Image (cartoon, rainbow, N blue to C red):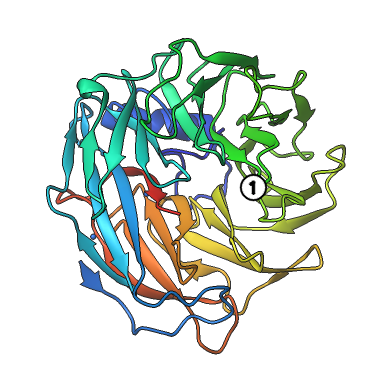
Amino acid sequence: MPVRRPIFASVFRRRIPLSAMLLRVSTAVSLLGLTLLLSSCGEFFTPVNNTTAATGSTTYAYVVNVSNTGTGGTLSEYSITSGVVAALSGSPISLPATPTSIVVSPNNAFVFVGTSIGVLMYTVGTNGTLTQGNNGTVIYQGPSQPVYLAMDATSSWLIVANKNSTELDALAISPLTGLPQTGTPVPAVLDSASPVEIAMSPANNNVFIALGSGGTDAISFAAAAASPWGPAPFHIPMAPNSTSANAVAVDPSSTYLFIAESGTSLLRKFAISNLSAAQNTYSVGQSPSAILSDPTGQYVYVANYTANTLSGFALSAGALTPLTDSPFATAKAPLAIAEDSTKNYVVVAGFGNNPDLWVYSYDATSAGTLDVDTTLSTASTDPSYAIGLALTH
């Protein structure tokens, strides 16, 4: 029961398999696959404990939304400058097919959007606005609909997980043009055909895939090789009584792997050097759906889809400690969480009622605690059906 797209029911005590929840929401909006703005909320706080101040620096945020008719969707474009969010010129962009996922290349030159017809590529302008590339045609069509995208640190490989498929594809991409170097992707074979999320290690040497009811896979990766995949995946079973591995993340030092599982509402921490057993487990909210391992290496946040909260932890010497005032309120049915390039703001998108995009600053007195800075709606309809979020790095 993957938690990565519309997936959970709200306040019932009984546990509903995420796969069933996904099916319900997917049916409601005719989503074909699984695959985050303007009323101000709260005052501005000066972020603390950040590695860069970067006051005034701009991050661009891109949100894919499913149409409330269930056909097609939009790609919304925003700038975030000192906590102020503004729509870019030409936003939103109409998509030719239902979106499923989105990723920004690490070199901030391209945005890739997974859709029901394949992967579309957009170039990022100097002002953050997007222009569709490859003459408006898809750059990738896999064995089925792409459900999650990731990119390696060199911006040379687009990693694609496909719906109901054990095939995980690595497509060689030119970091200069964003176009495929060859039309044939390099496949790896997963242990389950239910992928819901991918995490690349910052060291660029491992890929981790949350497989819903199939647990989690880890695969070694070599960006310089013509065929980047290592041997068969190392499989990480779920904890006893867990029902779905919904999200994966890696800390900035590539030392720890985090896996969020529902059924048990657990965040599990592993040493990447030894994935055979979890080092520690931590309680989070019901139906955890996304993880942010803060780029400063100080905090870990978990979005909880059914609970409509964020669980926050301080990370120190490999141990996680709940943050003051955690869990934090957030968008309804949160599906994605990211930190901006200045490391001053955290952004969450939810597949629920408006406002569906929440921007947080760091509290001035309680380290790591998140204060709501701005809330926005990514579409005029309610709910907005935002299903994917990507920020420039």
Residue 102 coordinates in the image, percent (x, y): 39, 38
Farthest residue, direction front:
176
Residue 66 coordinates in the image, percent (x, y): 26, 36
Residue 45 coordinates in the image, percent (x, y): 42, 84
Q: Does 211 sit left or right of 93 as displayed?
A: right
Q: Does 95 sit left or right of 157 as displayed?
A: left
Q: Does 15 sit left or right of 240 as displayed?
A: left
Q: Which residue is mark 1?
A: 202
The structure residue drawn at horizontal position 50% and vertical position 21%, both measured from the top left corner, is: 171
Quarter-of-image position of residue 170: top right
- Residue type at mark 1: give it: Pro
Q: Which quadrant would the C terminus be assigned to in this image?
A: bottom left
The structure residue drawn at horizontal position 56% and vertical position 32%, both measured from the top left corner, is: 1
Residue 307, compared with residue 216, is above or below; it is below
The structure residue drawn at horizontal position 51% and vertical position 14%, both measured from the top left corner, is: 185
* Local SS, label 1: loop
Question: In this rendering, does residue 74 appear at all?
Answer: no
The structure residue drawn at horizontal position 39% and vertical position 78%, both measured from the top left corner, is: 55
Nearer the observer, 261 or 296: 296
Nearer the observer, 68 or 230: 230
Residue 73 coordinates in the image, percent (x, y): 22, 34
Nearer the observer, 167 or 341: 341
Q: Does 196 sit left or right of 231 as displayed?
A: left
